Image (cartoon, rainbow, N blue to C red):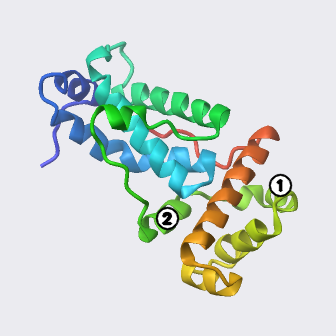
Amino acid sequence: MPDARSDTELLLASRSEPSAFVEVYRRHADELLRYVAGRVLDPEVAAELTAETFAEAFASRGSYRDTGAEGVAWIYGIAKHQLGRYFRRGRVDTAARKRIGLPERPLPPEDYERIEELVDLEPFRAALVEALGTLDEDQRRALELRVVDGLPYTEVAARLACGEQAARQRVSRGLRKLALLLQERGLQPATEVTS
């Protein structure tokens, strides 16, 4: 049965009752993942940034203070910080996950597809077409097959004559480059925070 306490109450309670944090995660993980995925356009990076955000929130829950805003706003603040760090460094920090002992794990294929579905790219089609022209041929072709044609990774790999993991990497790297190019042009294919 879901916990009826507010996010703020749960975050404060989680200091002495760590299991209270599970309810905060349950309530907001999908929406935060959507928020992050819409900014990085890369399923693997989105999953890592979301995990790092919640790990950081859990690790620093003792410093959370009730400021009158909903508790989830604090978590989105952490996510924004993680995104900024990612765009500056070009990699996802894993310090918080290591601090709380979360093991690294690869993103399962079904999660790639679920995360890709969270990002609506339709409003950005013209900018994407232009940005696609700046990618390496192997990344562009992989993105066309996966994102434009909607083919499963097994088919993308077959058409590119490479392994499925290589196809995933080409799509992932291409999406990362696109996200950076769109950000440079002031575009963000993302929905606003609805929490």
Identified at 54% across, 31% down, the residue is 80
Label 1 crowding class (10 Å Cα cut-off): few <14, some 14-19, many 20+? some
Drawn side of residue 129 relative to residue 121, left or right: right
Would you name the residue on which mark 2 appears? 112
Label 2 crowding class (10 Å Cα cut-off): few <14, some 14-19, many 20+? some
Identified at 55% across, 71% down, the residue is 165
Disc 2 residue type? Tyr
CA distance separating discs 2 and 1? 23 Å
Identified at 32% across, 13% down, the residue is 65
Would you name the residue on which mark 1 appears? 127
Secondary structure under tag 1 reads helix
First along the sequence among labels 2 and 1: 2
Q: Is residue 2 above or below residue 12?
A: below
Secondary structure under tag 2 reads helix
Image-quadrant location for residue 152 = bottom right
Disc 1 residue type? Ala
